[in-house]
Amino acid sequence: MSEILNKLSGQGVAIWLDDISRERLRSGNLEQLIREKNVVGVTSNPTIFAGALSKGDAYDVQLHDLAVRGVTVDEAVRAITTYDIRWAADVLRPVYDATGGVDGRVSLEVDPRLAHESDKTVAEARALWWMVDRPNLFIKIPATLAGLPAITQAISEGISVNVTLIFSLERYRAVMDAWLAGLEAAQAKGLNLATIESVASFFVSRVDSEIDKQLDKLGKPELKGKAGVANARLAYAAFEEVMSSERWQSLRAAGARPQRPLWASTGVKNPEYADTLYVDQLVAPGTVNTMPEKTLDATADHANITGDTVRPFYEDAWNVMAALKEAGVDYDDVVKLLEDEGVQKFEASWNELLESVTKNLVP
């Protein structure tokens, strides 16, 4: 195992892989990453599945069988994705058992075309939860305005949720409120709160990508590459605030577990920045960092893990946000744009996945 990854895990950061494919499962690569690279969870999204299906022959037999059965393309996509998620959940089950259900988790996203429809999102979440039928599953629900009541409802029914596509601090607070409301409803129903897990996926690199473009236009290059980390650090401050509230303490006493902040979109997109930027600078206890394999390998090789790099830097983070505002960056416009683009990108990937399955549904 990498000494650096051991050090990162020792700081309370759960290392998850932001990728899945049947070839990775079939070859035993996921098991290898669990053994050798401290991987204790897996996240997926429509883009990852679209990429997996476009390579190799791992899906050929199942595609043939689905074609012979004459299933619809939507049913085929559900069958293909849930198969992979179920398999990955089984591979990670020992981690789930060893951590008391905290890690060893695998995430599966609801159809992104439902991102603005609460009732349909809940119905899809229930269906996927039933189809995968593994206790270490997370259903990914986007943090859109319509997603918030869906998060509450899913949690209230005992469905563990990975809330995805969070960009703004205001929306993150709304996500935590929706999660708490779900736990309160679950408690009222007599459910075991200890069995309901949740993470909140706060996106990082995309914030820098958008704000950096604006800073170039504004002639403020000295502020580039700072917004993503500052935004995430302030999200952790908001998390700590909620964790100290009476509302949470009451639920915790009833057996509930925290909704951990998860740093997503941690692959560095600007080659001028350190390739482990969103790992080194976001080390804090009780967090998850889900990494593309390239970032995982870079972290194992040369990341600089020096201890907590979040809580000591709250003032610096506020100063960065103030400087961005003074420079002319409209934070509210940025995060709205990123949410809209995020949904659109996942919809585009989903449509690509549908097209690929349609093309390959040949008896």
Image (spheres, rainbow, N blue to C red):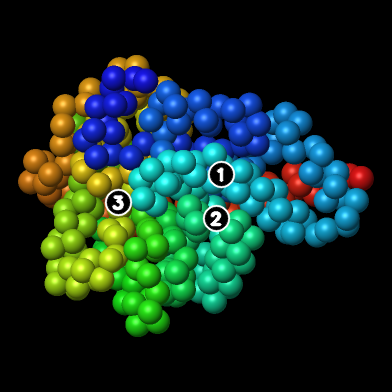
**Residue 320 visible in rendering:** no
Examine the rendered structure and indicate whether residue 219 appears above or below residue 238.
above
Residue at 60 percent of width and 56 percent of height: 132
Quadrant hosting residue 179? bottom left
Q: Give the Cα separation between the discs numbered 3 and 1.
A: 24 Å
Sequence-wise, which precedes: disc 2 or disc 1?
A: 1
Badge 3 density bin: few <14, some 14–19, many ≥20, Cα 10 Å: many
In the image, taking residue 222 as reference, residue 267 lies left or right, namely right
Q: Secondary structure at mark 2?
A: loop
Dot label at residue 90? 1
Residue corresponding to mark 2: 134
Asked if disc 2 and disc 1 are in contact, CB closer than 8 Å, the reply is: yes
Residue corresponding to mark 3: 261
Sequence-wise, which precedes: disc 2 or disc 3?
A: 2
> Residue 63, image x and y in percent?
80, 44
Is label 3 or label 1 in front? 1
Q: What is the quadrant of the C terminus in the image?
A: top right
Q: Secondary structure at mark 3?
A: strand
Is label 2 or label 3 in front? 2
Badge 1 density bin: few <14, some 14–19, many ≥20, Cα 10 Å: some
The total of numbered circles placed on residues is 3
> Residue 324, image x and y in percent?
19, 46
Residue at 74 percent of width and 59 percent of height: 75
Q: Give the Cα separation between the discs numbered 2 and 3.
A: 22 Å
- Tell me the kind of residue under disc 3: Pro
Q: What is the quadrant of the N terminus in the image?
A: top left
